[in-house]
Image (cartoon, grey):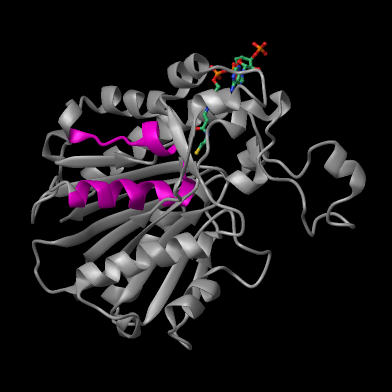
Amino acid sequence: MPRTEFISTGFYVPERVVRNEEFTQWMDTSDEWIRTRTGITERRWVADGQTGSDLAYQASQLALERAGMKAADLDCIIYCTLSPDYFFPGTGVFLQRQLGVPEIPCLDVRNQCTGFLYGLSIADAWIRTGQYKRILLVGSEVHSTGMDLTTRGRDLSVLFGDGAGVAILGPTTDEKRGVLSTHIYADGRYAELLFSESPASAHNPRISHADLDAGKQYAHMQGKEVFKHASTRMPQSVKLALESNGLTPQDIKLLIPHQANLRISEMVQKLLGLRDDQLYNNIQRYGNTTAGSIPIALDECVQAGRLQRGDLLVLAAFGSGFTWGSAAVRW
Ligand code: COA
């Protein structure tokens, strides 16, 4: 059976940079509060009319170019997002249409911050069994169109940013390379702790005027609980990725944790005893881009030459659901 290799990566973030200071014109907050609690200094926001599939398209074009491939060479799209362009159809088809590759299957994955790892797990299974040979795996989000920019929403609106990252995956017969393992988990007992309640088919009407007045169209989070679970589940997932491959933290060349909060990443680093050079963070510049965060960070590392053939890369994520997981990859 072949293994799954990363053929190429790409990312795209919108041009508009929103620095922490900008939030002070809308709500009671400060650059100091945001930086010290989260590590974030700025994030990107889409222009009017720019969609998640538009961001994904730009990132995909870059990855295709780097792979020396045309869109027609793809045989499947897996599109991970918590902020789909529309309720339905899934966003993968809008990307497929822009890429001009009708008929290839488009699977939308809805596992929030762990979306990219759920998508990788599916892609890996399909590639190893020979179902598909060239999979475009996408993590793309637009948060800025759904933010409560008043003091009521300050705990969440300062955290998130827009952006897309992609990877093109295919089979390799090189036994020393490729995806070694993926581990994915979920626990619905905590579903409402990081939650977007409306609009939803669970209510009739899906959203009412009263809901809008109450701000139910905005996500809600119990930040401390999320923080607590994230900072235990992420290191646990990394340990599992290592142990299941007979590896130790010292073997890691690069750990890319989902970029939820710099304090969470620091906790993961400390619990695993990793040096600074073994871990990558870019939340300072992009905020939390949910399913986009791992592939954006991965592409930055690849372009900076931080991964050489055979290096051990570990990816780990935690998010709404709760969902969490990890992947171990020989680059
Ligand atoms: N600016 C200023 N004050 C803010 C604020 C903001 N943007 N957001 C919240 N506050 C206030 C709160 O209202 C609260 O005020 P109070 O004490 O008067 O009630 C105070 O700051 C402390 O809030 P608290 O929620 O206790 O802060 P915290 O130390 O838990 O940090 C987070 C808040 C959001 C940074 C933190 O909980 C976190 O990072 N959680 C995980 C988030 C995450 O990773 N989510 C995505 C998962 S994938």
In this view, 283 is above or below 273: below
Q: Is most of the magenta stretch helix, strand or loop? A: helix
* Residue 168, visible in the rendered structure: no
Q: Quick one: 279 or 242, which is closer to the camera?
A: 279
In this view, 312 is above or below 135: above
Question: In the image, is 179 to the left or to the right of 12?
Answer: left
Q: Quick one: 273 or 261, which is closer to the camera?
A: 261
Task: Specify whether residue 287 is painted magenta.
Answer: yes
Q: Quick one: 84 or 230, which is closer to the camera?
A: 84
Could you say where residue 298 lies in the image, as x and y percent from the top left?
A: 28, 49
Q: Quick one: 32 or 244, which is closer to the camera?
A: 32
Could you tell me which quadrant the N terminus lies in? bottom left
Q: Residue at x 38, y 35 (%)?
A: 285
Could you tell me which quadrant the C terminus lies in? bottom left
Question: In the image, is 76 to the left or to the right of 300?
Answer: right
Q: Residue furthest bottom?
A: 103
Task: Specify whether residue 56 is painted magenta.
Answer: no
Could you say where residue 131 lies in the image, as x and y percent from the top left?
A: 34, 82
Q: Residue at x 27, y 60 (%)?
A: 9
Q: Residue at x 64, y 43 (%)?
A: 191
Magenta extent:
278-303
